[in-house]
Image (cartoon, rainbow, N blue to C red):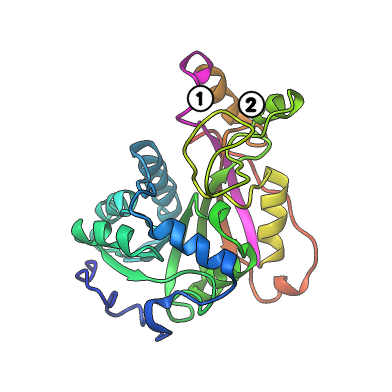
Amino acid sequence: MTAPPASATGPADPVRLVTGPAGLVPETAHGTQRLHAFYADPGTVFSSGEERARRQVRMLAAALAARPGPQVVVDVGCGDGAATHQVRLLDPRNTVIGVDWSATALARARARGLAVVQGGTDGAGLPLADSCADVIIMSELIEHLVDTDAAADEARRVLRPDGILLLSTPNLAAWFNRGLICLGLQPAFSEVSLRGVYGRPGSQVAGHLRLFTRRALVEFLAARGFTCERIAGAPYHDVPRPLRPLDRALCHWPSLASILLVQARVKPAADLRQKGSSPCASSPPS
């Protein structure tokens, strides 16, 4: 099965779109509107970067290895579609859909020939039907969201009962952040404003709102109905060159790694009634 043609209205079957308000952007609190405006700004960076795109494809390839036949893959927060395009090339039989709330980003993704639809995890939720996807990708998305609970709930709703969530996010407890805090500096990846960077090196505002440690991410996913199957660490491209060997070596310990990579599966209905979380196996760096 090949991916459906890109269009302004989104993909064709097997994914049925759910109608919602125009633009699928909720008119909520002033702060949320400002966040939408931040991502609507043409000056905001939407590119995944080559390293992140390759990492995303490797994660997906590993997840699909045990899933025969064509799969429906949804990339939530697809940005300009650089990584999504690589995912589509992985297996032309798969249906790959990109979702983002930025019209500017979607225009760039559509120019790559991708099937895209505008929407988000807040407000009306993802404009996709229940249980329509085999895999959902949230690559360095969750740290940008106001309501992370709604995002995880939407992922579980859209995924099929045995569906897989592939999630990556910066690690608040990365090895260098532990040192920065000891020095009284703002941790890397964290921001206190959408207008500038304060208290730490750097100048590019990324719009990070929520940051996770390994423990917090595993417990959060368990509470939202997912079983964590695999967790790994990945290096950060902006680490100074002399420190990159150390950054890569510490990926063997995800709790210290710069980036957290998680593969989680929707819990069976019976398991959702059980409280608590199970430990997640660590894997070699990706």
Q: Is 230 colored magenta in this rendering?
A: yes
Count neighbours of disc 1 (C-alpha within 10 A) and say few if under 14, some if 14 to 19, many if 20 or more: some
- Residue at the spot 53% in from the left edge and 17% down from the top edge: 243
Q: Is 21 colored magenta in this rendering?
A: no
Nearer the observer, 224 or 238 = 238
Specify whether 143 is left or right of 83: right
Q: Residue furthest top?
A: 242
Q: Quadrant of residue 178?
A: top right
Residue 233 can be seen in this image: yes
Residue 107, position as x, y percentages in the image:
25, 61
- Residue at the spot 39% in from the left edge and 60% down from the top edge: 40
Nearer the observer, 68 or 132 = 132
The image's mark for residue 176 is 2
The magenta segment is 225-244
Q: Of the residues shown, which amino acid type is indicated by label 2?
A: Phe
Specify whether 155 is left or right of 60: right
Q: CA distance from mark 1 to mark 2?
A: 9 Å
Contact? badges 1 and 2 (CB < 8 Å): yes
Q: Which residue is mark 1?
A: 239
